Image (cartoon, rainbow, N blue to C red):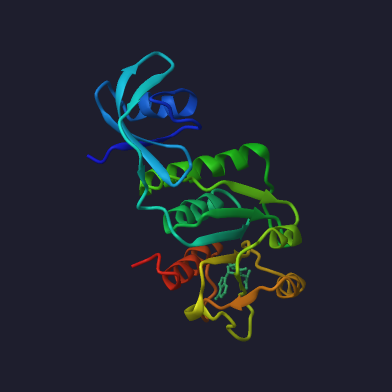
Amino acid sequence: MTARRFFTDKIENVTVLTGEEFRHAANVLRVKKGDEVILCDNTAYEYPGRVLSVEKNSLSVKVEGRRKSDREPQAEVTLLCGYLKGDKTEVSVQKAVELGAKKIAVFRSEHCAAYMNENKLARLNKVSAEAAKQCGRSVAPEVVYFDDFAAALASVTAENKFFACEFAEKDEAELSALSSSAAVVVGPEGGFTAAEAETAKAAGFSFLSLGRRILRADTAAVAALALVMRALGELG
Ligand code: SAM
């Protein structure tokens, strides 16, 4: 069985897991003394080790090495997605982490029907960490929230900026010449307004078409990211 991964802020010779990571290891995965594990500290490195002891509220790991993760993407890709109802944003976050997004921003826009709060944002970050562990990454991308759509767009520093626009008359995305960083914006269930599309254009985003059919927002996030990741050599 593949060694289980756990995230911690600080790696030491003997690293102690507490809190949520401890509970997941001890109570859910039933990790026990002598098991091989991999510790990650949200850097490009990962640390194989072995469980020394499992206590009531903590678990100690003897770190046995340090190696560069071969699962972290080279490309810097950001997903910006409208906040969705129910657990749909969790789906987008999970898939984005698996596909190799390095940054994830969730925004509120005019046609958003859902409201963010602290607990929901914490939940999205938990989903990111779970997805990172599941697919073997050493970094769980932080999920941040913007209450303001223009501020979300302005936060993007990527060289290539795409706006998945369901009503774009023409696909402007030149994916064959992509360089190392890209950002993709996907709207909420209600889609974008014409004014929001104009704002994105003014901020330097190119319209990306995902075909003639209207995709659900979470499907569109996966499709757009897959196209960009493939163009950047991160898939296949
Ligand atoms: N309510 C909108 C409508 O009926 O036209 C559909 C919004 S769609 C469910 C949510 C988001 O997914 C869109 O804002 C867009 O970002 C993306 N999307 C869905 N289908 C798309 C397509 N064919 N091309 C580009 N983007 C698409």
State whether residue 140 appears in this view. Answer: yes
| Residue lying farthest to the top in this orientation | 56
For the C terminus, which image quadrant?
Answer: bottom left
| Spot occupied by residue 147 in the image (x, y as percentages of width and height) | 74, 52
State whether residue 84 appears in this view. Answer: no
Q: Give the total number of marks visible in the rendering.
A: 0
| Residue lying farthest to the left in this orientation | 1
Ligand 1 shows up in the quarter that is bottom right
Write the residue at 46% across / 37% down.
41
Look at the picture and state if 108 lies above or below 232.
above
Look at the picture and state if 47 lies above or below 50.
below
Look at the picture and state if 8 lies above or below 18.
below
Judged left or right of residue 154, residue 26 is left
Judged left or right of residue 69, residue 159 is right
| Spot occupied by residue 83 in the image (x, y as percentages of width and height) | 63, 54
Judged left or right of residue 14, residue 209 is right
Write the residue at 74% across / 58% down.
151
| Spot occupied by residue 208 in the image (x, y as percentages of width and height) | 57, 76
Quarter-of-image position of residue 33: top left
Q: Nearer the viewer, residue 168 or 53?
A: 53
For the N terminus, which image quadrant?
Answer: top left
Q: Nearer the viewer, residue 123 or 2?
A: 2
| Spot occupied by residue 118 in the image (x, y as percentages of width and height) | 66, 38
Judged left or right of residue 24, residue 160 is right
Write the residue at 37% across / 24% down.
27
Quarter-of-image position of residue 48: top left
| Residue lying farthest to the bottom in this orientation | 170
